[in-house]
Amino acid sequence: MEAIETLFKAFTFALTGVPATIFVSLVAVIIGTFVGLLFALMKKSDNKIISGISKAYIEIVRGTPMIVQALIVAFGIPAFLQSNDIMFKWPDLIIPALLVCGLNSAAYMAEVIRGG
């Protein structure tokens, strides 16, 4: 009986994260669509510099795991800035989550849009 109680408590605790998950997902789709469209258009550009920037971004973001991107943005960038005497800390960790999910989604969305 105690195991079921513990399982129920864990499940109800996990449910408290559902609104944040839905929020991050919706914002990521919105960011991904608009930024992805921008990168798809950049990749189709005749300008080799603009096209190259887009190709590099898409390949780097699609080629690295999202957890690595999240750790770099959430903890690596603030640590790097602080080591260079620039005081920076995310006011809330949902901000890097929104950035990473949105920009990761944009890389995949750019290929979807470009591919037709």
Image: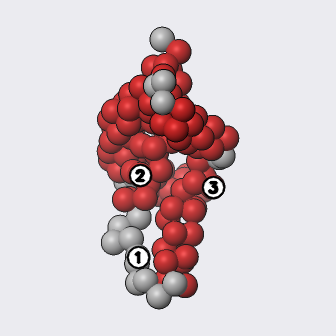
Q: On the image, numbered disc 2 is attached to which residue?
A: 99
Q: In the picture provided, is 98 more to the left or to the right than 58?
A: left
Q: For the view shown, which residue lies furthest in the bottom direction?
A: 85
Please identify the quarter of the rendering in which residue 26 is found: top left
- Earlier in the chain: of badge 2 and badge 3, it is 3
Q: Nearer the viewer, residue 64 or 43?
A: 43
In whole angstroms, how far apart are the C-alphas of marks 2 and 3? Answer: 13 Å
SS of the residue at dot 3? helix
Q: On the image, numbered disc 1 is attached to which residue?
A: 89
Q: Nearer the viewer, residue 115 or 23?
A: 115
Q: Tell me where residue 14 appears, x and y as whole percent.
A: 46, 52
Please identify the quarter of the rendering in which residue 58 is found: top right
In whole angstroms, how far apart are the C-alphas of marks 2 and 1? Answer: 15 Å
Q: Tell me where residue 70 appears, x and y as whole percent.
A: 54, 56
Graded by Cα atoms within 10 Å as few (under 14), some (14 to 19) or many (20 or more), the crowding at tag 3 reads few
Q: Residue at x 42, y 26 (%)?
A: 41
Q: In the figure, 110 relative to 103: above or below?
A: above
- Earlier in the chain: of badge 1 and badge 3, it is 3
Identify the colour scheme used. secondary structure
Q: Residue at x 43, y 59 (%)?
A: 96
Question: Total of numbered circles in the picture?
Answer: 3
Graded by Cα atoms within 10 Å as few (under 14), some (14 to 19) or many (20 or more), the crowding at tag 1 reads some
Graded by Cα atoms within 10 Å as few (under 14), some (14 to 19) or many (20 or more), the crowding at tag 2 reads many
Q: In the picture provided, is 42 more to the left or to the right than 6?
A: left
Q: On the image, numbered disc 3 is attached to which residue?
A: 68
Q: Residue at x 35, y 39 (%)?
A: 31
Q: Residue at x 39, y 71 (%)?
A: 90
What type is the residue that disc 3 sits on? Val
Q: Look at the numbered discs 1 and 3 and tell me whether their residues touch, using CB distance below 8 Å.
A: no
Q: For the view shown, which residue lies furthest in the top direction?
A: 116
SS of the residue at dot 1? loop
Q: Tell me where residue 78 appears, x and y as whole percent.
A: 48, 74
